Amino acid sequence: MAKISGNEIRPGTVVEHDGGLWVAVKTNTVKPGKGGAYNQVELKNLINGTKLNERFRSAETVEQVDLEYKDFSFLYEQGEALVFMDTESYEQLELQKDFVGERAAFLQDGMMVTVRLYGETPIGVSLPDQVVLSITEADPVVKGQTAASSYKPAILENGIRVLVPPFIEAGERILVDTNEITYLRRAD
């Protein structure tokens, strides 16, 4: 780990502060009329998600943490655990569903994900930004409903509900944004 001065913290920088791992979300350099300048930083805890606002003067130093990013392949779901395999060493990693969050529903067999590691401890999982899924149920189109919103609810093969345009029918495959959980377009 490297020490950096408080005014070098930028959004996305991961630091060790007060015994925890924090990522800088927002930073603002403040130069008051009296006194020295400081960096107002909004920090988010990487483990439990709590937020903290902290002032760092240029004379203060903090430990910058370098995270390791590794590619893993999703294997299967086992009860409340999700099993992943390291693509280089073939070691398996079990993570709880709530660690991945609601986006766990988008995991498919063999899907490549990126796991953020601090030492050997996983602290985050990044899924692909887009996945292709089939629609199992879609409401019928109501004629003359163009004055209101022209999107209709549909249920995907993984049970997630999304809004789709009226021309999309059950059985079609669509591209879904896994971050916003929204319809993007028909799959090719």
Image (cartoon, helix red, strand yellow):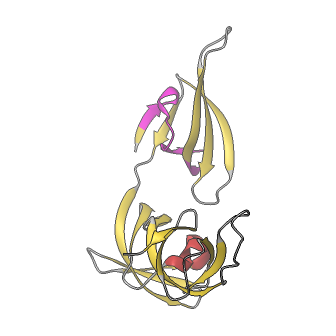
Range covered by the magenta-colored residues: 3-22
Residue 133's spot in the image, x, y percent? Answer: 48, 80
Q: Is residue 86 above or below residue 150?
A: below
Quarter holding the N terminus?
top left
Residue at image coords 42%, 67%: 128
Q: In this view of the protein, can residue 90 be seen by the observer?
A: yes
Q: In this view of the protein, can residue 101 be seen by the observer?
A: no
Q: Nearer the viewer, residue 113 or 131?
A: 131
Residue lying farthest left? 88
Q: Quadrant of residue 55?
A: top right
Q: Is residue 40 above or below residue 178?
A: above
Q: Quick check: is 42 in the magenta stretch?
A: no
Q: Is residue 158 left or right of residue 5?
A: right
Q: Nearer the viewer, residue 15 or 98?
A: 98
Residue at image coords 73%, 62%: 147
Q: Is residue 115 left or right of residue 106?
A: left
Q: Nearer the viewer, residue 124 or 172?
A: 172
Q: Is residue 122 above or below residue 81?
A: above
Residue 154's spot in the image, x, y percent? Answer: 63, 80
Q: Is residue 132 above or below residue 122?
A: below
Residue at image coords 61%, 85%: 159
Residue 32's spot in the image, x, y percent? Answer: 66, 13
Q: Quick check: is 5 in the magenta stretch?
A: yes
